[in-house]
Image (cartoon, helix red, strand yellow):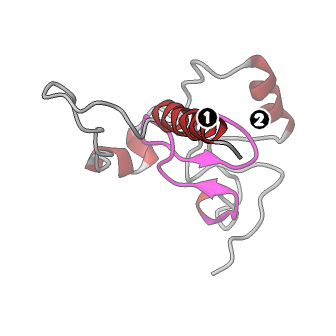
Amino acid sequence: MDRKKFIKTFAFGALSTSVLVAACGGDAPKTENATAPAATPEPAPEAAAPAATADCTDMTGIAEADLKQRESLGYVAKSVEAEKNCSNCRFYQPGTQANGCGGCQLFKGPVTPEGYCKTWNKKEA
C-alpha cells in the first residue's frame, strides 16, 4: 500500500468513527445549561393506596377494541365469589394504573382488587 492510499484510508476511517460516535450521542458537547436526565421519581404513597379510594371505573382513553376484550372476559368490579378475586389472581398487577388502581396482563384499563373475570387463575404462593 502506498503512502497516499494509507493516509486516505486512515482519514476516512477516523472520520467515519467520529461520525458514528457522534450519531450515537457519545460525542455530545457538554454545556453548562445541559440538564442531567431526570431520575425516576418514587411512587407517591397514594399511588399504592388501595383501589377502593380510586375511581377504577373511569375508562377514559381506553380504545373500543380494548373495552370489548375486557367485556369478552367478563370482568366485573366486584367478585361474587370471595375466594376468587383479582387480588389473588396470577394476572393481576397491583397499583399499575396512574389513578392507583391495579391492572391486568390480559386486558387494558383499571382493575379493582375485588374484581373478577372468567380467566381468574389462582396466584402461586
User: Mark 2: few, some, or many residues within 10 Å (few <14, many ≥20)?
Assistant: some
Q: Is residue 22 left or right of residue 107?
A: left
Q: Nearer the viewer, residue 95 or 35?
A: 35
Residue at the spot x=44%, y=35% of the render? 25
Q: Nearer the viewer, residue 36 or 115?
A: 36
Give the label, 2 or 1, closer to the camera.
Answer: 1
Quarter-of-image position of residue 91: bottom right
Residue at the spot x=58%, y=52% of the render? 114
Tag of residue 119? none
Judge whether residue 103 is colored magenta. yes
Q: Position of residue 61 (x, y in %)?
A: 59, 18
Q: Nearer the viewer, residue 91 or 10?
A: 10
- Identify the mark nearer the N-term, 2 or 1: 1
What is the secondary structure assignment of the residue under circle 1?
helix
Q: Nearer the viewer, residue 32 or 27?
A: 27
Q: Is residue 85 left or right of residue 34?
A: right
Tag of residue 4? 1
Residue bounds of the magenta highlight: 88-110
Q: Mark 1: which amino acid?
A: Lys
Decide: is 81 above or below 27: below
- In the image, farthest residue toward the front: 2
The residue carrying mark 2 is 70
Does the CB distance between marks 2 and 1 fall below 8 Å? no
Q: Mark 2: which amino acid?
A: Arg
Q: Position of residue 120 (x, y in %)?
A: 77, 58
